[in-house]
Image (cartoon, rainbow, N blue to C red):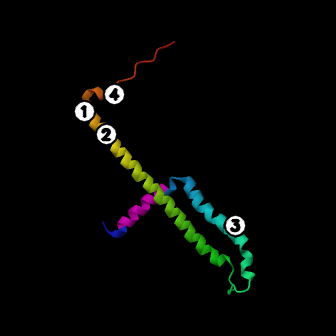
Amino acid sequence: MTAIAQTAHVSGRHLRAFVRQPWFVGVAIIQPVIWLLLFGALFSGITKLPGFGSSAGYIDYLVPGVLVMTAIVTGVLVTEREAHLVRLEATVSQLEGEVRALKSKLGDELSVQPAPPAKSP
């Protein structure tokens, strides 16, 4: 498998997981918009100060910063989710090993018995 195919496979897996969590999609879309509206309005007058040195508006400086912050926050959230899944998988495999060890020690005593029928009133 080439590096491009591997990258496409991993990217597809992450995008499917991303779309399956609508709250995450909403946050990823709404958060940059809020930052642009809030900080754009808050610092709009900074271009009028002496020494700003450019006729470009503040939004020209704000948008790249918001894009980088969105990428960082999204990356941290995805990395944290993956780390949680790895810890969960390790816990489950450890529990499965313990159950197998108990079954081998106890034999048939550990078999699941059906529940008794419910009594009617």
Q: Earlier in the sequence, mark 1 or mark 2?
A: 2
In this rendering, the label closer to the viewer, 2 or 3: 2
Which region is colored magenta? 5-17
Residue 105's disc is: 1
Q: Earlier in the sequence, mark 4 or mark 1?
A: 1
Give the quadrant of residue 49: bottom right
The answer for how far apart the CA atoms under marks 3 and 4 are is 59 Å
Q: Position of residue 30 (x, y in %)?
A: 62, 61
What residue is pinned by disc 3?
38
What residue is pinned by disc 2?
98
Q: Is residue 76 left or right of residue 48?
A: left
Q: Position of residue 94 (x, y in %)?
A: 33, 44
Q: Earlier in the sequence, mark 2 or mark 4?
A: 2
What residue is pinned by disc 4?
112
Secondary element under disc 3, as helix, strand or loop, is helix
The answer for how far apart the CA atoms under marks 4 and 1 are is 15 Å
The answer for how far apart the CA atoms under marks 2 and 3 are is 53 Å
Q: Is residue 68 left or right of residue 58?
A: left
Residue reaching furthest top?
121
Q: Position of residue 9 (x, y in %)?
A: 38, 62
**47 vs 109: above or below:** below
The answer for how far apart the CA atoms under marks 2 and 4 are is 16 Å
Q: Earlier in the sequence, mark 2 or mark 3?
A: 3
Secondary element under disc 1, as helix, strand or loop, is helix
Amino acid type of the residue that numbered disc 2 sits on in the rendered structure? Glu
